[in-house]
Amino acid sequence: MMTSETEYQGTHIARLPGGSELRRQVEEIVNGTPVVDIHTHLFAPQFGKMNLTGIDELLTYHYLIAEVFRSSKVNTEIFWRMTKSEQADLVWRSLFVENSSISEATRSIVTIISELGLNPNANDLTEAREFFAAYDTQELIDHVFDLANVSDVVMTNDMFDARETQVWSTGTSIDRRYHAALRMDRLLNDWENTSAKLRELGYRVDAKLDGESASEVRRFLDAWIERMSPVYMAVSLPDDFLYPHNDVRDRVIREVVLPTAGDSKTSELRVERCRRRCRQSRPEGGRTNVRRESRSAVPGDVFIPRKPA
């Protein structure tokens, strides 16, 4: 039997749920779908003190610190001389007690505190600190993963950080929910010192990337890729980064990084650019995804996928 287009469309539309029911179904599906967070600065509990937990660590995240510097009269030098708890107290008082939490970063904290059953309107951090202190680290991680419905996270791992390399070199079994990402910052942004470190490790490299240097760095990266099984490589670049450019970093990118990213063992390369004022306000060098006009061939935040096998 033939059906007219009008009859078909009417039948098809009638099968769709009403607005409220459609919203309910979408919310149910979204909230019930486990999330994989592909870029974090988290560390698995096997990394010991690098696995940061607690309200003080949440409140001293660099987005919140930058917001405090913008919205209060605190002197940056005085702030960085404070203890972690003193910094957290200042952030809480400045952004949550004395002002309304309207930014994305502050609203995230309110959501976290509320979901954990704590009071987001508290005048101080006593309750929150007691809550986190009562938890075993592994128990807290399991609780947060379940509460957030997160199945896996990707770390950001520095193969030149002695604290990290000690863990990886021992062959310690890492929590299966935590996956590695190979951080290339020192390789690309501090080649002179990094090349010296590689020579100490027995690799035949020099500061000009001459001779066997490129192949030796590739050998170094291949060893760490084999050890860590990273899902991608990542780098945060300075605001004056230019590519292509006549410098050693250009050669490292062309002769080392991109060929490695094209290897079937490595999934992709993640590139970020960091603004100078971000580094000035935070000694450790906070990162932010930005776009700016320059002669750089790399935009603010890109993924360079590997070539097909």
Image (cartoon, rainbow, N blue to C red):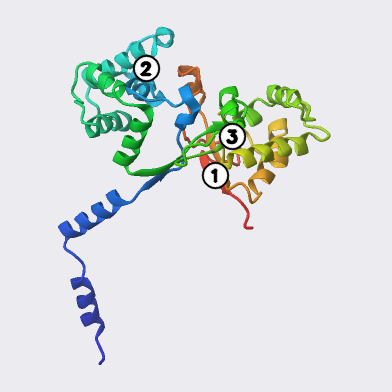
According to the picture, the residue beneath numbered tag 1 turns out to be 231
Residue in front for this viewpoint, 33 or 172: 172
Q: Amino acid at mark 3?
A: Gly
First of labels 3, 2 by sequence position: 2
Q: What secondary structure is marked by label 2?
A: helix
Question: Which residue is found at the position 22% from the left and 24% from the top?
Answer: 100
| Above or below 224: residue 83 | above
Question: Which residue is found at the position 27% from the left and 17% from the top?
Answer: 94
The reply to whether residue 253 is in sight is no
Left or right of 147: which side holds 258?
right
According to the picture, the residue beneath numbered tag 2 turns out to be 69
First of labels 2, 1 by sequence position: 2
Image quadrant of residue 222? top right
First of labels 1, 3 by sequence position: 3
| Above or below 304: residue 278 | above
Point out the image quarter for the N terminus. Answer: bottom left
| Above or below 258: residue 184 | above
Image quadrant of residue 6? bottom left
According to the picture, the residue beneath numbered tag 3 turns out to be 171
Assess whether mark 3 and mark 1 are in contact (beta carbons under 8 angstroms): no
Badge 1 crowding class, 10 Å Cα cut-off, few under 14, some 14 to 19, many 20 or more, is some
Point out the image quarter for the C terminus. Answer: bottom right
